[in-house]
Amino acid sequence: MRFFSKITFICNCCFVVAVILRWVENTNKKNADFDGAIQLQPLKSTFVVLGYGAIFVNVLFLISYLFVKLFFKKPVKVQQQILIPIAVKQSNTNALIWINFLFFIAQIYYFFFTT
Protein backbone atom coordinates (compact mmCIF):
# COMPACT_ATOMS: atom_id res chain seq x y z
CA MET A 1 0.00 0.00 0.00
CA ARG A 2 2.91 2.37 0.55
CA PHE A 3 4.00 2.20 -3.06
CA PHE A 4 0.43 2.63 -4.34
CA SER A 5 -0.10 5.63 -2.05
CA LYS A 6 3.07 7.25 -3.39
CA ILE A 7 1.98 6.70 -7.01
CA THR A 8 -1.41 8.18 -6.16
CA PHE A 9 0.26 11.18 -4.55
CA ILE A 10 2.37 11.78 -7.68
CA CYS A 11 -0.77 11.65 -9.84
CA ASN A 12 -2.49 14.07 -7.47
CA CYS A 13 0.42 16.51 -7.77
CA CYS A 14 0.10 16.26 -11.55
CA PHE A 15 -3.60 17.06 -11.12
CA VAL A 16 -2.70 20.30 -9.35
CA VAL A 17 -0.21 21.19 -12.11
CA ALA A 18 -2.79 20.40 -14.82
CA VAL A 19 -5.40 22.60 -13.15
CA ILE A 20 -2.90 25.45 -12.84
CA LEU A 21 -1.90 25.04 -16.50
CA ARG A 22 -5.54 25.14 -17.58
CA TRP A 23 -6.16 28.25 -15.51
CA VAL A 24 -3.08 30.03 -16.90
CA GLU A 25 -3.99 29.19 -20.48
CA ASN A 26 -7.62 30.22 -20.08
CA THR A 27 -6.70 33.57 -18.55
CA ASN A 28 -4.07 34.31 -21.20
CA LYS A 29 -6.04 33.20 -24.27
CA LYS A 30 -7.36 36.72 -24.56
CA ASN A 31 -3.91 37.73 -25.82
CA ALA A 32 -3.32 36.59 -29.37
CA ASP A 33 0.39 35.98 -28.84
CA PHE A 34 0.09 33.36 -26.05
CA ASP A 35 1.64 30.04 -27.10
CA GLY A 36 1.13 28.09 -23.89
CA ALA A 37 2.42 27.94 -20.34
CA ILE A 38 4.91 25.17 -21.10
CA GLN A 39 6.66 25.18 -24.46
CA LEU A 40 7.54 21.48 -24.20
CA GLN A 41 4.34 19.79 -25.39
CA PRO A 42 5.13 16.20 -24.24
CA LEU A 43 5.69 17.43 -20.68
CA LYS A 44 2.44 19.34 -20.72
CA SER A 45 0.59 16.31 -22.10
CA THR A 46 2.07 14.09 -19.40
CA PHE A 47 0.87 16.44 -16.67
CA VAL A 48 -2.61 16.60 -18.17
CA VAL A 49 -2.99 12.84 -18.66
CA LEU A 50 -1.65 11.96 -15.22
CA GLY A 51 -3.56 14.82 -13.63
CA TYR A 52 -6.96 14.12 -15.11
CA GLY A 53 -6.50 10.38 -14.66
CA ALA A 54 -5.65 10.91 -11.00
CA ILE A 55 -9.28 10.65 -9.94
CA PHE A 56 -9.40 7.07 -11.24
CA VAL A 57 -6.14 6.16 -9.52
CA ASN A 58 -7.42 7.82 -6.36
CA VAL A 59 -10.67 5.83 -6.44
CA LEU A 60 -8.76 2.58 -6.92
CA PHE A 61 -6.42 3.44 -4.08
CA LEU A 62 -9.18 4.37 -1.63
CA ILE A 63 -11.23 1.28 -2.47
CA SER A 64 -8.22 -0.99 -2.09
CA TYR A 65 -7.28 0.70 1.19
CA LEU A 66 -10.78 0.22 2.57
CA PHE A 67 -10.77 -3.40 1.38
CA VAL A 68 -7.48 -4.09 3.15
CA LYS A 69 -8.60 -2.33 6.34
CA LEU A 70 -11.96 -4.10 6.49
CA PHE A 71 -11.02 -7.63 5.51
CA PHE A 72 -7.49 -8.03 6.79
CA LYS A 73 -7.65 -7.51 10.53
CA LYS A 74 -4.11 -8.75 11.09
CA PRO A 75 -1.58 -6.07 10.10
CA VAL A 76 0.92 -6.96 7.44
CA LYS A 77 4.36 -7.32 8.95
CA VAL A 78 6.99 -5.10 7.42
CA GLN A 79 10.66 -5.71 8.02
CA GLN A 80 12.17 -2.95 10.08
CA GLN A 81 15.13 -1.19 8.54
CA ILE A 82 18.03 0.07 10.60
CA LEU A 83 17.79 3.73 9.62
CA ILE A 84 14.03 4.29 9.63
CA PRO A 85 11.92 3.05 12.54
CA ILE A 86 8.61 1.35 11.76
CA ALA A 87 6.59 4.08 13.55
CA VAL A 88 7.91 6.70 11.12
CA LYS A 89 6.98 4.53 8.13
CA GLN A 90 3.47 4.03 9.47
CA SER A 91 2.94 7.74 10.15
CA ASN A 92 4.15 8.64 6.65
CA THR A 93 1.75 6.12 5.16
CA ASN A 94 -1.14 7.46 7.22
CA ALA A 95 -0.31 11.01 6.20
CA LEU A 96 -0.24 10.03 2.51
CA ILE A 97 -3.59 8.30 2.88
CA TRP A 98 -5.17 11.43 4.37
CA ILE A 99 -3.53 13.69 1.79
CA ASN A 100 -4.79 11.44 -1.03
CA PHE A 101 -8.28 11.51 0.49
CA LEU A 102 -8.22 15.33 0.59
CA PHE A 103 -7.05 15.42 -3.02
CA PHE A 104 -9.96 13.10 -3.89
CA ILE A 105 -12.44 15.54 -2.34
CA ALA A 106 -10.84 18.39 -4.31
CA GLN A 107 -11.04 16.33 -7.52
CA ILE A 108 -14.71 15.56 -6.98
CA TYR A 109 -15.37 19.26 -6.49
CA TYR A 110 -13.33 20.20 -9.57
CA PHE A 111 -14.81 17.62 -11.95
CA PHE A 112 -18.44 17.65 -10.82
CA PHE A 113 -19.16 21.06 -9.32
CA THR A 114 -17.15 23.53 -11.41
CA THR A 115 -17.78 24.52 -14.97
Image (cartoon, rainbow, N blue to C red):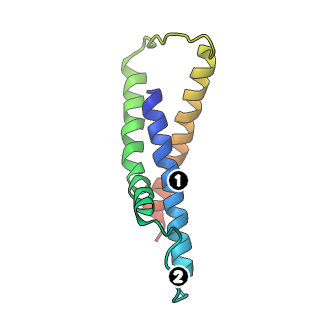
Q: Would residue 63 be found to the left or right of residue 9 on screen?
A: left
Residue 34 badge = 2
Q: Please report the residue visible at 52 percent of the width from the left and 34 percent of the height from the top.
A: 97
Q: Please report the residue visible at 56 percent of the width from the left and 12 percent of the height from the top.
A: 81
Disc 1 target residue:
106
Q: Please report the residue visible at 58 percent of the width from the left and 21 percent of the height from the top.
A: 89
Q: Please report the residue visible at 63 percent of the width from the left and 15 percent of the height from the top.
A: 83
Could you tell me how many numbered marks the image carries?
2
- Disc 1 packing (10 Å; few <14; some 14–19; many ≥20): some
Identify the element where label 2 is drawn: loop
35 to 94, vertically: above or below: below
Residue 71 badge = none
- Residue 58 at x, y = what percent? 42, 43
Tag 1: residue type? Ala
- Residue 79 at x, y = what percent? 50, 10
Tag 2: residue type? Phe
Q: Which of 42 and 27 is in front in this view?
A: 42
For marks 1 and 2, give the CA distance. 29 Å
- Residue 106 at x, y = what percent? 52, 53
Q: Which of marks 1 and 2 is nearer the N terminus?
A: 2
